Image (cartoon, rainbow, N blue to C red):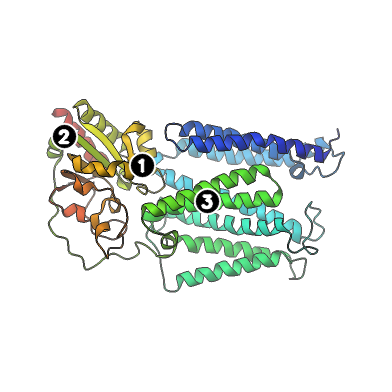
């Protein structure tokens, strides 16, 4: 059987329009919690079509001339790709079934990293086709044109993909608790990081000239990718757990950009569009997350926020504990209760009990709302995902701008495992979080704080809220504490 490779490529380029449309529709659907699940399905269908189309692309199969032997190709390239897809898909399916919602930030970090690593791998293959003499590849060797755009884009995609992969590994280790979650900083760290990045870029540039000039062909490209990975590790180490929502979205954007650059380098329309969508959405989300903390992205990346604790500040007042029966009495006879969840709720896996508490309160005529800070938890939308998974209706969830003016009319504000995002120290000039938008829970008539102990938040700052006259501390594991509270509410 014979086939014209050019004709096949033109046909496949037209077919790519379908997954591109599906990607756009999926992204639109995922902007709303109520339609997010359907958006994920559409995106999955789009990816499936794109994978199938890519697998029969002439450059992938090796059909570079008219009259290629299809049976021979089907027993080589396609079989190898099918095996790789089966292994990767099997691992992903198992993870999706077994990983708990509380561990979703770690899973997202892994997926970001895998995307970045794949982009770096594509870049490496593309560059090797240039610098290996007589490689037989379809790409021209750069000895004749050192400024050929696709090779330059492959270098850029390789560097960004390597950084995303390595940085995501560190994010995963910190989120999983296998590495110190606090910022790790040392003198001259930023200067060292810049040097590593610049040297990596230099070696990337050297690959554009390499045709045996530098001896063994793999030396510049190995140093290029090796230093890119090193920079990714070094970039993520000084970023602490509280900044993870920003960092995860940033690496997500990096992965998208790397994929898009590789798409331009290889002429793959699906990669170009998918990478551009992910890169632009991730970039926008990163800026929104940074704005939610009133900090620049540079400050997040280079300030080592949370590495040192605040000292020299004396709190006025005292911590006043309260028991389940008293909390139940306050909430059962309230007109409105606003719940502000945080990472502590995720750690305790208390979202199901929180939903049960909401149902008991609503059965007593109490209005219950949830105030979601943009950076509460360890990834963008972390609290929304957990509460939705527990069955809390979407119309009960409100972001900071929507809910903040309601705390003054609120009878009880309950803080579950949140700290810095409700800390009035953000209003105190000189505080490390000064100017950060917070949930104004201190304005509620009564504030109940569920907390394991008396420790400080990630930022190392004493929380003024805990010492206010209208605040009571309800100590204990969040799941156990809310379970006892639900029992007390039912007795009333």
Do residues under tags 1 and 3 come within 8 Å of each other at their CB atoms?
Answer: no
User: Label 1, label 2: how many angstroms apart (C-alpha)?
Assistant: 24 Å
Badge 1: residue crowd in 10 Å (few <14, some 14–19, many ≥20): many
The image quadrant where one finds the C terminus is top left
* Mark 1 or 2: the one toward you: 2
Q: Position of residue 429 (x, y in %)?
A: 26, 63
Q: Residue pushed farthest front?
A: 405
User: Label 2, label 3: how many angstroms apart (C-alpha)?
Assistant: 44 Å
Q: Write down the residue under mark 1.
A: 383
Q: Position of residue 479 (x, y in %)?
A: 27, 39
Which of the two labelled residues, at mark 2 and mark 3, occupies the earlier sequence position? 3
User: Label 1, label 3: how many angstroms apart (C-alpha)?
Assistant: 21 Å
Query: Would you identify the image quadrant in which residue 476 lies?
Result: top left
Do residues under tags 1 and 2 come within 8 Å of each other at their CB atoms?
Answer: no
Do residues under tags 2 and 3 come within 8 Å of each other at their CB atoms?
Answer: no
Q: Secondary structure at mark 3?
A: helix
Q: What is the tally of numbered marks visible in this picture?
A: 3
Q: Is residue 488 visible?
A: no
What residue is rendered at 60% in x and 70% in y? Answer: 199
Q: Write down the residue under mark 2.
A: 334
Which of the two labelled residues, at mark 1 and mark 2, occupies the earlier sequence position? 2
The image quadrant where one finds the N terminus is top right
* Mark 1 or 3: the one toward you: 3
Task: Give the label on residue 253, or none.
Answer: 3
Q: Secondary structure at mark 2?
A: loop
Which of the two labelled residues, at mark 1 and mark 3, occupies the earlier sequence position? 3
């Amino acid at each position: 059987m014979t086939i014209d490779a050019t004709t096949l490529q033109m046909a496949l380029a037209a077919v790519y329009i379908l997954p591109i449309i599906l990607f756009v529709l999926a992204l639109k659907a995922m902007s709303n919690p109520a339609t997010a699940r359907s958006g994920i399905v559409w995106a999955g269908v789009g990816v499936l079509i794109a994978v199938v189309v890519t697998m029969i692309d002439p450059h992938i199969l090796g059909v570079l001339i008219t009259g290629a032997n299809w049976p021979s190709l089907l027993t080589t390239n396609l079989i190898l790709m099918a095996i790789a897809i089966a292994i990767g898909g099997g691992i992903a399916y198992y993870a999706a079934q077994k990983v708990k919602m509380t561990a979703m930030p770690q899973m997202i970090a892994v997926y970001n990293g895998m995307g970045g690593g794949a982009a770096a791998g594509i870049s490496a293959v593309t560059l090797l086709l240039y610098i290996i003499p007589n490689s037989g590849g379809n790409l021209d060797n750069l000895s004749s044109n050192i400024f050929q755009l696709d090779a330059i884009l492959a270098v850029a995609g390789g560097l960004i993909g390597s950084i995303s992969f390595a940085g995501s590994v560190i994010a995963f280790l910190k989120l999983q608790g296998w590495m110190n979650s606090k910022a790790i900083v040392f003198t001259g760290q930023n200067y060292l990081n810049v040097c590593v990045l610049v040297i990596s870029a230099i070696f990337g540039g050297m690959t554009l000239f390499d045709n045996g000039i530098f001896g063994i062909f793999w030396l510049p490209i190995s140093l290029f990718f090796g230093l890119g990975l090193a920079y990714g590790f070094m970039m993520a180490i000084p970023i602490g757990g509280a900044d993870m929502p920003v960092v995860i979205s940033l690496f997500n954007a990096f992965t998208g950009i790397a994929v898009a650059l590789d798409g331009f380098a290889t002429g793959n329309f699906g990669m170009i569009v998918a990478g551009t969508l992910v890169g632009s959405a991730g970039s926008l989300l990163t800026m929104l997350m940074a704005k939610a903390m009133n900090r620049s992205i540079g400050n997040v990346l280079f300030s080592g926020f949370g590495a040192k604790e605040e000292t020299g500040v004396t709190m006025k007042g005292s911590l006043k504990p309260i028991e389940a029966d008293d909390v139940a009495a306050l909430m059962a006879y309230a007109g409105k209760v606003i719940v502000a969840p945080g990472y502590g709720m995720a750690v305790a896996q208390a979202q199901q009990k929180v939903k049960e508490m909401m149902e008991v309160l609503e059965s007593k005529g109490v209005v219950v709302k949830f105030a979601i800070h943009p950076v509460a938890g360890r990834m963008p939308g972390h609290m929304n995902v957990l509460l939705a998974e527990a069955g809390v209706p979407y119309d009960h969830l409100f972001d900071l701008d929507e809910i903040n003016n309601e705390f003054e009319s609120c009878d009880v504000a309950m803080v579950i495992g949140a700290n810095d995002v409700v800390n009035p120290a953000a209003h105190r000039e000189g505080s490390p979080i000064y100017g950060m938008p917070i949930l104004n829970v201190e304005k509620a008539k009564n504030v109940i704080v569920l907390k394991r102990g008396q420790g400080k938040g990630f930022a190392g700052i004493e929380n003024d809220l805990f010492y206010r006259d209208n605040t009571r501390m309800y100590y204990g594991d969040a799941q156990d504490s809310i379970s006892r509270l639900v029992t007390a509410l039912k007795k009333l």
